[in-house]
Amino acid sequence: MQEDLAEFKELASSAGAEAVAVITGVRQTPESKYFVGSGKATEIQASVQANKATLVLFNHALTPAQERNLERLFQCRVLDRTGLILDIFAQRARSFEGKLQVELALLKHLSTRLIRGWTHLERQRGGIGLRGPGETQLETDRRLIRNRIQFIDKRLVKVRKQRAQGRRARRRAVIPTVALVGYTNAGKSTLFNRLTGAEVYVANRLFATLDPTLRRINLPQLGPIILADTVGFIRHLPHDLVEAFHATLEEVSEADLLLHVVDVHDERKQENMEQVDAVLKTIGATEVPQLLVFNKIDLEKNLLPRMDRDEENTIVRVFLSAEQGLGLAELQTAIGEFLAKNNQQYSLDLTPDQARLRAKLYELGVVVSEEIKPSGGWGLVVKMKESEFQKVMGKN
């Protein structure tokens, strides 16, 4: 598909590679030795020599044996789609957690390809004094990698527990979480910065930011919410990466609302939306409500900031430009309306000895109005979810 090829070129460019030739082919089933047929492999070899290329990228997943065979034929490094994405992730990760997640995915990928680093030992075919060194070194490397994977897994388990504690604390505080999701380069981080005043790294490239960022903001007539920026999705996202970033993606599956950011200017927006939904299904987040946010309207003619509603008068789409700061008020209205629609209004008569409960309700930002009683107590009108109301009142 032309869309896949265009995206692959973007991936290569994001990794810092300069494409000197693009070779395509059609084949019903992969060839076991080279993935491509011998004729196509020879064609690629000729192009490598003619362009003095130092790297060949494949827009497919290669087996370790196919990678080795192609490297021997081309006499240069060969990288498949998974390896390319992993390389980009390794460049982008900035936080300690992000680096751990990338390293874990890299090690799992490398563990099946160890033999490539020891091809010089293949000359040792046996004989007195020549048996074993290659096998011993490979086993040593495999053991070291296994140990490192186990170590990282344990560290990420701790990270997952810390995140779970943070989510429990937010639930206790009755603060809803809104997570930004979307195809990579749709403008999530730009929108996040606009809404929160943060300075998350932004660039017009794939996977510009990997590390999850959470910020607390206050919405008019709603109060505080937690906004979470997440890694962008992509077609054929390697399974190892989904697994490695599970701790990060849990913020998505546990959110109260997903803002599905879409690049309205992208011709592939429908396919991109389907890919995002596929990844959400993989991580078990399909039940989380979504609000579609069509970004980059400044690149389209005749598109102005607006909100679209369905037959039940519920806002389902918002059109905005995060870069230009257009439509942010509409988005805040949509978020507030969605989070508030399940809220109920309660009237409370608090006695003077319930001052701590009154302070808690104000801290949560759920107080609609207050009346001071002659007795010294307070008459409060609060608006919040029934489950959260029961939770707060049950502790007092």
Image (cartoon, helix red, strand yellow):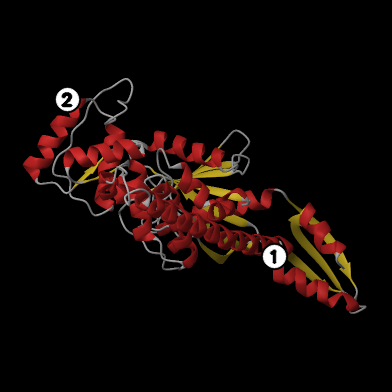
**Residue 64: horizontal and vertical position, in percent?**
35, 40
Q: Residue at x 54, y 61 (%)?
A: 151
Disc 1 marks a residue whose amino acid type is Ala
- Please state if 20 lies on the left or on the right of 335 as rendered: left
Q: Is residue 380 visible?
A: yes
Residue 176 in which image quadrant = bottom right
Q: Residue at x 19, y 31 (%)?
A: 41
Q: Residue pushed farthest left? A: 50
Q: Residue pushed farthest right? A: 375
- Work out which quarter of the rendered image holds the C terminus and state it: bottom right
- Label 2 sits on a secondary structure element that is helix
- Identify which residue, 75 or 192, lies in the foreground: 75
- Label 1 sits on a secondary structure element that is helix
N-terminal of the two: label 2 or label 1? 2
In this figure, which residue is indicated by the disc labeled 2? 39
- Please state if 291 lies on the left or on the right of 105 as rendered: right
In this figure, which residue is indicated by the disc labeled 1? 169
Q: Residue pushed farthest top? A: 28
Disc 2 marks a residue whose amino acid type is Gly
- Please state if 111 lies on the left or on the right of 57 as rendered: right
**Residue 118: horizontal and vertical position, in percent?**
30, 50
